[in-house]
Image: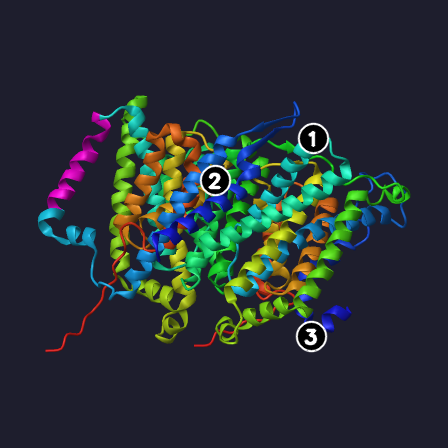
Amino acid sequence: MTAKDEIKKSFLASIWFMFLTFPIMVIRVNTVTDTVEWRWYNMALVGIGAFLLSMLWRYLLKRQADGSKKEKTQGPGRVQQLLQKKEFFLPGIILLGCFTLLFPHVFSMYQTNIMISALIYVMLGLGLNIVIGLAGLLDLGYVAFFAVGAYSYALLNFHYGLVFWIALPLGGLLAALFGILLGYPVLRLRGDYLAIVTLGFGEIIRLVLQNWNDFSFGPSGIANIPKPGLPGMDLSLQGSTIFIFYIIVALVIFTIFVINRLENSRIGRAWIAMKDDEIACQAMGINKAKTKLRAFALGAMWAGMGGVVFAAKTTFINPASFTIWESVIILCTVVLGGMGSIAGVMSGALLLILLPEYLRDFGQFRMITFGTVLVLMMVFRPGGMIENVRKTYKFEKK
Amino acid sequence: MLLIESSRGDGLFYCLSPLLLFTVPGIPGQDRQQSRIYMDFDFEYFGLLFLGGLTRGSIYALIALGYTMVYGIIGLINFAHGEIYMIGAFTGLIIASVLTMAGFPTLAVAILAGMAAIVYSCAYGVTMERIAYKPLRNAPRLSALISAIGMSLFLQNYVLLAQTSDFLPFPSLIPDFEFWEPYAHILTSPELVIIITTVVVMILLTLLIQFTKIGKAMRATSQDKMMAALLGINVDRVISVTFIVGSATAAIGGILIASHIGQINFYMGFIAGIKAFVAAVLGGIGSIPGAVLGALVLGWTESFFTGYISSDYEDVFAFLFLVVILIFRPSGILGRSETKKV
């Protein structure tokens, strides 16, 4: 294709997008004063942007098509290779460990708080990774389990005065129970139906929390949830924040450890097999129902524990924190990072939660970026930033 | 009870059994509506709820058609379909306001705004397909679904950023007809227009699919994409046309509901989209008469539920309904059950 054709195509695309975005981007009607604001500069922006982006878009698509024609390079990618080398891995871990240990003492309270939220999302991402990345079940109601965890701590504390340390495993267990409750009826459903039913489930939980005033105090939420402590420990506000930071760090490490072990266990391999082909998997003697339920329960458990930490951190929860879009953000972290890969999900979560915090000026563009990221990742790099590498065995002729 | 004995009986029974509950006499509705009471059962209130449900169901049907057609052809749940409906309503509002300020007569405003909404919705539908779904046609189903969710998020926030997050008042494009005056207390003129439009759209759509060349191509593509392509059908074009038709019906639904309710915001597409999806699944996704039937059943059950029991849990009810249908009859009322072959 000649350069002239390319320019012509991009030019047409830019005209098309100028037409497409005309009413919504250019005209703004003020219905109170009955005036119309014409924003022609937006049209110019769209035109230039569409021209350049359509060039880039076609170039990337072409490169992808060329890439898939070539022999696919098997074996781990660059990051994995780096992680597998002992001489990089050990010092890396030690450096990272020192950094996390010192983090709350070096940086301000504000930074620590942001980091706690990001780490909660890391935990949620890792939990969802079990359900989506390993078992291949698209769960759009994941935030419901997060809500279950948060509310179980808040309510148990309110009514029975349970402390954080008892609520933490209890919240995880309750969420796992809800995972089974949800999983049981949807066992027979295919992938895309499953997504919608889980979405419905997530919304049901939120709407019930919002409407059932006697149980959950409705939209006004629950305030004054105590922060975690230990007997004989009297913490200031700053101290308790640092304490929560260490708790969540410990929990994340625990999560990584468990998931890492799960991945290579019998269940983990059953999940991966089920993701690839359910029927073949059943033919190999794997109990589909049990395997799926385990994925739901184990995935939900982390969300429940994350919820308990979230409630303890913010000391106030209400149903507005648990909307469907929260599930989509968690999904986005998993997709961006790389489904199935622990390092990928972690970096995805840190990137997606930390970047918008530091780029406050772009805060309003946060959700639109998430949407774009989902589409672009699926089109150009379905494996995510750090692709999960499956174990492969190569038969080499002698 | 005839329904139960028919071949599709069990599915219908499951779906209609909630309706049977409502016909039990003695459930009070009288305190809301002071009117004549026949034998403990308020027929006028019942009739109002029935017609309200019919209106609601008609709107759901218009949106559900897009879901079911796209699913029938490419097997994708087009998550962003509700957003197309929202964009239709927004375009309609913007064009209508501009034209009104320019001094056009009401009828011209209504027609031009309606046409603009349809054209723009179709344009968005086609563009969306080209960007987010076409490159993923051979990818796993999960990828296309995630891409659709991303598209939905993108379009919502695009309208939020470019326009406003507030509710915008929508002008009533449908006038009150004089000849309908005597019946207006039962069914308002806009509601009448909604029902009639839905019926007309359904008839046109059936004609399109059954008797035109492109309709034949659509049916062929939905049966077997590969074979259709071998027989010289331009599959890409068929898919584009499907998106155009689906978006057009969604836009019609968008303007009708917006001028009926009187306000819109960027978030209106999401819940409407989910409900229309419930309707499509209820009727059997992929089946066009199924979508209409499912939408009507959902509209009525919702209307009776809110009228007789409680309006707090209206949305919970729709979701529960979906879960129950999918558990007992995943293929819907009119859907074919799909057996997977190895």
Q: Amino acid at mark 1?
A: Ala
Q: Residue furthest left?
A: A87
Residue position marked by numbered label 1 in the rendering: B102
Q: CA distance from mark 1 to mark 3?
A: 58 Å
Chain ID of residue with mark 3: B
Give residue A172's position: percent from left, percent from top: 38, 46
Q: Say yes or no: labels 3 and 2 on the same chain.
A: no
Q: How crowded is the residue under tag 3: few (<14 C-alpha within 10 Å), some, or many (20+)?
A: few
Left or right: A244 in relation to A365: left
Give residue B118's position: percent from left, percent from top: 64, 48
- Residue A272 in view (yes/no): yes
Segment tinted magenta in the rendering: A90-106
Circle 2 SS class: helix
Q: Amino acid at mark 3?
A: Ser
- Foreground residue among A89 and A21: A21
Chain ID of residue with mark 1: B
Magenta stretch, overall SS: helix
Label number found at residue B7? 3
* Residue plotted at (50% across, 72% down): B229
Q: Amino acid at mark 2?
A: Phe
Q: Say yes or no: labels 1 and 3 on the same chain.
A: yes
Residue position marked by numbered label 2 in the rendering: A322
* Quarter-of-image position of residue B259: top right
Give residue A233's position: percent from left, percent from top: 27, 26
- Residue A150 in view (yes/no): no
Disc nearest the viewer among 1 and 3: 1
> From the viewer's perspective, is residue B29 above or below residue A388?
above
> From the viewer's perspective, is residue A287 above or below residue B247?
below
On the rendered image, what quadrant is the N terminus of chain B found in?
bottom right
Give residue B250's position: percent from left, percent from top: 63, 50
